[in-house]
Every structure is written in C-alpha cells, then in structure tokens.
Image: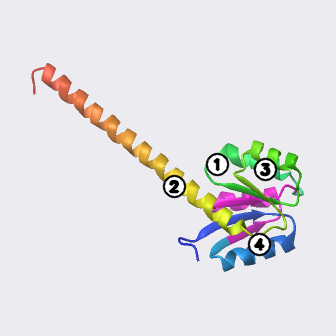
Amino acid sequence: MLSPPFRVLCVDDEADACAMLSALLKLSGIECECAESAAEARKLISTSRFDLYLLDAWLPDLDGFEFCRQLRAIDSITPILFYSGAAYDSDRQRAFAAGANAYIVKPEVEGLVETMAGLIIEARESAMKLRSTALSNLIEANRRAKFSELSAAKAGGSF
C-alpha cells in the first residue's frame, strides 16, 4: 500500500473501464473516483482535491485533449495521465501538447500504478519546493525590510 493514500479522478465514459480501474487502484491503496464526462468531472473537482487526473481521450461531451487544456488552465501542478485506446502517435502528441504528463494506451495495465505513483510523488515534491522557495523569499523580503527600517532609524539618529 502507498502512503499517504493518493486520490485519483478517473474520467472515462466506459463504466466497465472505470470499475476495472477503481478495483485495480483500490488494491494498490489508491482512492479512485470516476466521472463519465468532463462535466461530471468538473463537479467532482469543484468539491474535492485529487492527486492525479486519469483521462480518456474520448469523452461524450468534450474530448479529453480539450478537457486536459482546461484543467491545465486552472491547475498547473496536478499530474494528468491519459489512459486511452487512442493509440496513434498523433494522439500522444495531442495529449502532451494539451499538458499531459504521461500517456498509456489501453488495455496496458502493467506499470500503470507505478507511473501514477511516480507522477504524484514528483508533483508533491515540486509543490514542496515551490512552497519552500516562496517561504524563503518571504523571509528574505522580511529581513530586507527590517534591515531597511534599522538603517533608516540609524541614519535618522534614533539608533
């Protein structure tokens, strides 16, 4: 089991594919919610946090590539993995151009969980580095402000 538990949103209009993926991920210690359309996925995203989006290229209301673009416009950090039957190189290229982090062709499941875990861990590490950098920048800005105040007080003779 992976620790801490990861949460994945699987967006696939095939109920059987969602059920299979949910079972596989559950066995691997990964929580999975499924949406059968981009609209349903948007609702889930608005109320829950996910560590990874697992997308199919073919969705009933919006293709997965456009949905990926929309996700990237609002979330540049959460990994997006396409798991799709669209097996042409052009499909892969479209996914990466839309902002996907990885692409696996159905029905290949070997390596799927490991790829997902790797993407999630990498994203968490990147987020931690960003937070650390932001905190360091804030501390440095505060230090400079205090130094400027002390310098101004010294120049004014009250130091």
Which residue is the site of mark 4? 21
Q: Position of residue 117 (x, y in %)?
A: 62, 64
User: How far, Cα to Cα, is label 4 from label 3?
Assistant: 20 Å
Does residue 49 appear in this view?
Answer: no
Residue appearing at x 69%, y 74% in the figure = 25
Give the mark nearer the N terminus: 3 vs 2: 3
For mark 2, give the secondary structure.
helix
Q: Position of residue 12 (x, y in %)?
A: 82, 63
Dot 1 amino acid type = Asp
Q: Nearer the viewer, residue 146 or 95?
A: 95
Give the mark nearer the N terminus: 1 vs 4: 4
| Within-10-Å neighbours for mark 2: few <14, some 14–19, many 20+ | few
- Closer to us: mark 2 or mark 1? 2
Which residue is the site of mark 1? 75
| Within-10-Å neighbours for mark 3: few <14, some 14–19, many 20+ | many
- Dividing the picture into quadrants, the one containing residue 56 is bottom right
Dot 4 amino acid type = Leu
Dot 3 amino acid type = Phe
Determine whether 74 is above or below 103 in the image: above
Residues under numbered marks 3 and 2 in contact, where contact means CB atoms less than 8 Å apart: no
Q: Which mark is residue 125?
A: 2
Dot 2 amino acid type = Glu
Residue range highlighted in magenta: 32-58
Q: Which mark is residue 67?
A: 3
User: How far, Cα to Cα, is label 2 from label 1?
Assistant: 16 Å
How has the structure been colored for display? rainbow
Tell whether position 50 is magenta. yes
User: How far, Cα to Cα, is label 3 from label 1?
Assistant: 12 Å
Give the mark nearer the N terminus: 2 vs 1: 1
Does residue 28 appear in this view?
Answer: yes
Residue appearing at x 82%, y 53% in the figure = 64
